[in-house]
Image: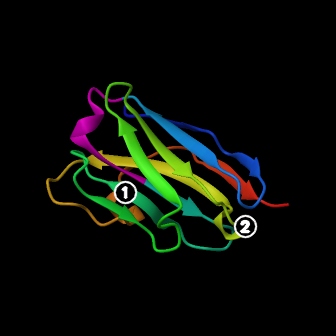
Amino acid sequence: QLQLVESGGGLVQPGGSLRLSCAASVFALDYYDIGWFRQAPGKEREGVSCISGNGGNTYYADSVKGRFAISRDNVKNTMYLQMNSLKPEDSAVYYCAVAPKIGLFRLCVPSTYPNWGQGTQVTVSS
């Protein structure tokens, strides 16, 4: 069964940085589209950043564009979300997700991703 294990969350001050990691128990990560999502209390889960299996297409939510960067290491079968210049409104539970690649860039919305990690808490506060 495909499993995703997240790490890297924590408490940081505004303006700080975190790097989230997600290790995937897959044969080859390059056969999967990957995404990072977040959900704040009382809000719907939203797409933060997604990247296609071949790395050719990348999406960032407007709220994080220029501050966050998604990447993947297909040798280690690990995906990352580098978060810089963090703001209090970035506080949420962050989830990684994967889906078999479809060739075309899938929508970076939760409903298009069938496989999810357990989530890791990110809190940005003074």
Q: Is residue 10 above or below residue 76?
A: below
Q: Quadrant of residue 90?
A: bottom right
Q: Nearer the viewer, residue 111 or 66?
A: 66
Circle 2 is placed at which residue position?
88
Q: Label 1 is placed on what type of residue? A: Cys
Q: From the viewer's perspective, is residue 36 above or below residue 46?
A: above
Q: Are marks 2 and 1 in contact (CB under 8 Å)?
A: no
Residue located at (37% from left, 39% from top):
72
Question: Residue at 45% of width from left, 70% of height from top?
Answer: 61
Q: Amino acid at mark 2?
A: Pro
Q: At 36% from the left edge and 47% from the top edge, which residue is drawn?
A: 98
Residue bearing mark 1: 50
Say whether residue 26 is left or right of residue 11.
left
Colour scheme: rainbow
How much space separates mark 2 and mark 1, taking CA atoms?
A: 22 Å
The residue positioned farthest toward the left in the image shown:
103
**Circle 2: is it few (<14), some (14-19), or many (20+) Cα within 10 Å?**
some
Quadrant placement of the C terminus: bottom right
| Secondary structure state at the residue bearing disc 2 | helix
Q: Nearer the viewer, residue 68 or 37?
A: 68
Residue 100 on the magenta span: no
What x and y, as percent, mark residue 106? 25, 62
